[in-house]
Structures are given as C-alpha cells and as structure tokens.
Amino acid sequence: MRQVFLTFVFLIFAACAQNRIAKPDTLMTSEQMINFHVDLALISASSTYAKDNFVSTDSLYAFHKIDSITFAQSNVYYASKPKLYSKIFESVKAKLTKLEEQDTTYVLKNPSIKE
C-alpha cells in the first residue's frame, strides 16, 4: 500500500513539473517583454490623455521588430511560468515608476513648465 501511495505522489510531482506550453520558435526574451510592456503602458496612458495623438499597436510591433503572433505566443509562454511572468511585470512597474520620478523631478526643477 505504501508503494502505491509513493508512486502516486511521484506521478503527481512529475506531472506538475512538465512544461504545459511549448517554447515558441520565435520567443521574445524577458528583457524584450519588459520593454514592450513598458511602451504599451506608455502608449495606453498617452492615448487617454491626448485622444488626437493616436499611436497604433502596429507601430509598436514595428518599433520592437516583432509581429503580433510573436508577442502573443511569447506572452502565453511567459504566462505559463507564473514566477517569471511576475518578475517581468515587477520590472515593468519599476521602470514605469523610475520614468515617473524622472518626469516629476524635471518638472520640479523647471517651474516654468506647466502641467
């Protein structure tokens, strides 16, 4: 009975260790994913601020030299690895915070700039 239980436990752990999502042929690096998400957040924020300055996501893909399929496959792959995916978004948040601090510092040093 004990051998059956140990075998069952081993099979559960072995099943959990498998890669559920296959690594795509054109996988973006984690740094590329971070940069893409930072730019995506900036475009999204700017489009709500100034509606007449629309930037399409196609131009974002062109800027990063990828296509939408590459991004979608890479995003699904990284999403299947929660620890790595959360590290990516922690880095995105850190970069956005740093950009915000730089912008705020620039405005504070130059009082002639009106927000």
Image: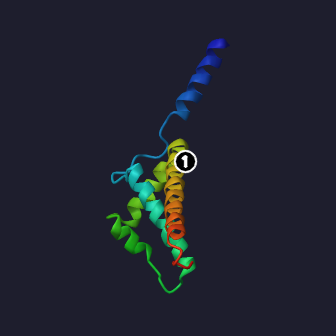
User: How many discs appear?
Assistant: 1
Q: Secondary structure at mark 1?
A: helix
Residue type at numbered disc 1: Ser
View extreme (bottom): residue: 52
Instruction: Give whichever of 24, 110 is nearer the camera.
Output: 110
Residue 101 higher or lower than 112, as above or below: above
Q: Residues within 10 Å of mark 1 (few under 14, many from 20)?
A: few
- Residue 31 percent coordinates (x, y): 40, 51
Q: Above or below — where is 5 with respect to 29?
A: above
- Residue shown at 49% from the left, 36% from the top: 18
Relative depth, front residue between 61 and 3: 61
Scheme of image coloration:
rainbow
Residue 98 spot, x, y in % from top left: 50, 57
> In the depicted view, which residue is nearer to us: 75 or 16?
75
On screen, residue 32 versus residue 102, left or right, reads left
Image quarter (top left, top right, bottom left or bottom right) of the C terminus? bottom right
Please tell me which residue is depicted at 49% across the width and 62% down the height of the picture.
102
Q: Residue at x 34, y 68 (%)?
A: 63
Residue 73 percent coordinates (x, y): 43, 56
Q: Position of residue 92 (x, y in %)?
A: 50, 55
The residue lying furthest to the top in this view is: 2
Point out the image quarter for the N terminus. top right
- The quadrant in which residue 108 appears is bottom right
* Residue holding disc 1: 86
